[in-house]
Each structure stands twice: as structure tokens, then as C-alpha cells.
Image: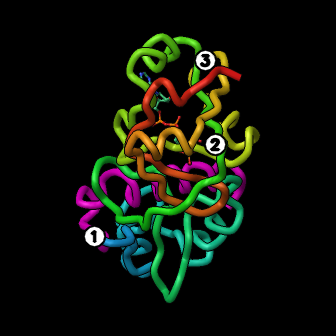
Amino acid sequence: LDENAEKSLSKLMTKILRHAPEEFGIALDPEDGSCPLSELLAAIQAEPRWARIEREDIEQVVRNSDKQRFAIEDGRIRARYGHSYNRVQYTPGEPPAILYHGTNEKALPSIVKEGLLPIIRQYVHLSESTAFAALAGSRRGRLVMLTVDTQQARQLGTAFYYAGNEVWLADRVPPQCCSVM
Ligand code: HQG
């Protein structure tokens, strides 16, 4: 797989494993959102463009993912984060005192009013480092970096969940816990 093919295969894999498994005839495990790698492979091979894809190509995408989007364990594959509403269970954890969220200037007025909301995903996505948050935030316009006071948020009832690779998830973050950096 060249770099472009890797990127579009990765997009297809996130579509299946985060958003629309049923469109591809796949049922994700309701707890961790995983499915057998063999099932994912068969579903992808059923797409005309990807008929000749091999297991090794999927493993290559998983290995090279800049954000470690996927995990393979015991012959099963899952997306670590990014799911649309209600697809995966996580265990609540104790986050660092400060987490980062990269957003864009158009979203800011609404975030200041309502706080951080999951929008189409199951959770708000936060990061331990500004680097990862900047990647997320610069996708939709000029980057605005927010810091989140996690202790204050927890006092106000927000639960945090660790998804791996420095990514934390939260149901929502009240506006008074968010500051522009
Ligand atoms: C914004 C990507 C208005 C929020 C990334 C974001 C990440 C609000 C957008 C991961 C808002 C949602 C997740 C409010 C939040 N009013 N806008 N009250 N609250 N927003 O894509 O965090 O490459 O669902 O700031 O890198 O950008 O796909 O979330 O701009 O890791 O692996 O609403 O997805 O990773 O957008 O990105 P998203 P996100 P992948």
C-alpha cells in the first residue's frame, strides 16, 4: 500500500469501526467496539475498490496510524476513540489536572456559552499534549487551544475515560472549566 492508499483504507476502517459497522454487515462488540479482524477484512474485500486487500495491509494501517487510531488484540480489531453515539464502554479514570482540546475560532462562542459537547461523537475528545490537540483543532479552521481544568469538571459531575495514546474522553465539559490558552 502506498501512502495515499493507506490513508483511504484508514478512513474506511474508521468509518466501519467508529460510525457505521451495520452498513458493512458488521456487529461490533457492545463493550469494547471490537470485531474479528477476519470479519473486517472480509467486509473491506467486499468493496470493489478493495477486493485485493490483505490482512497485512490492515495491519500496516494500524501500525502506521499517526494517532494510533486502532488496536489489534487476540485477533480482534477496534478503534480506540472517535465513535459516534453510544458504541463503546470505557472505564472512568483519573485524568491529569489539565487536559487540552484543540478547536477552531468559529466554534469558540458556542463553547464559551455551552461548554464542550460531543456533537456527533459519543464523547468530547481531550488530550494530554497540545501536539495531539493541535492536530485535531486545526482540521476545521484557525486553531484555538483550550485548557480544561479536570478537577473542577469532576467536581461538577463530568466523568473522564482514558482511551490510550494520551487521549481522554468526557461526556461534556462545563464552560467554566475551559480556558483559551
Ligand atoms: C467542537 C480526530 C460548537 C469541537 C481528532 C470540535 C480527534 C463545539 C467539533 C478526534 C462545541 C467536533 C476528535 C460546542 C465542541 N459548540 N462546537 N458547544 N463543543 N465543539 O471531530 O475533538 O483523525 O467530533 O471543538 O484528531 O475535533 O479522526 O471532535 O471542533 O482526535 O482519528 O465540535 O477525531 O481524530 O468535532 O476530534 P469532532 P474533535 P481522527
Kindly identify the amino acid type of the residue bearing the numbered disc 2: Leu
As drawn, 114 above or below 163? above
Q: CA distance from mark 3 to mark 1?
A: 34 Å
Q: Amino acid at mark 3?
A: Gly
The residue at the point 67 percent across, 62 percent down is 1
Q: Is-magenta flag for residue 9? A: yes
Give the magenta part as a residue range: 1-29
Classified by dominant secondary structure, the portion drawn in magenta counts as helix
Residue 1 versus residue 100: which sits nearer the camera?
100
Image height of 96 relative to 28, above or below: above
Question: Which residue is the site of mark 1?
Answer: 30
SS type, badge 3? loop
18 left or right, relative to 167:
left
Q: Nearer the viewer, residue 156 or 107?
A: 156
In whole angstroms, how far apart are the C-alphas of marks 2 and 1?
27 Å
Q: Residue at x 28, y 68 (%)?
A: 26
What numbered label is drawn on residue 99?
2
Quadrant housing residue 40: bottom left
- Residue under label 3: 141
How packed is label 2: few (under 14 Cα within 10 Å), some, or many (20 or more)?
A: many
49 vs 141, left or right, is: left
Q: CA distance from mark 2 to mark 3?
A: 21 Å
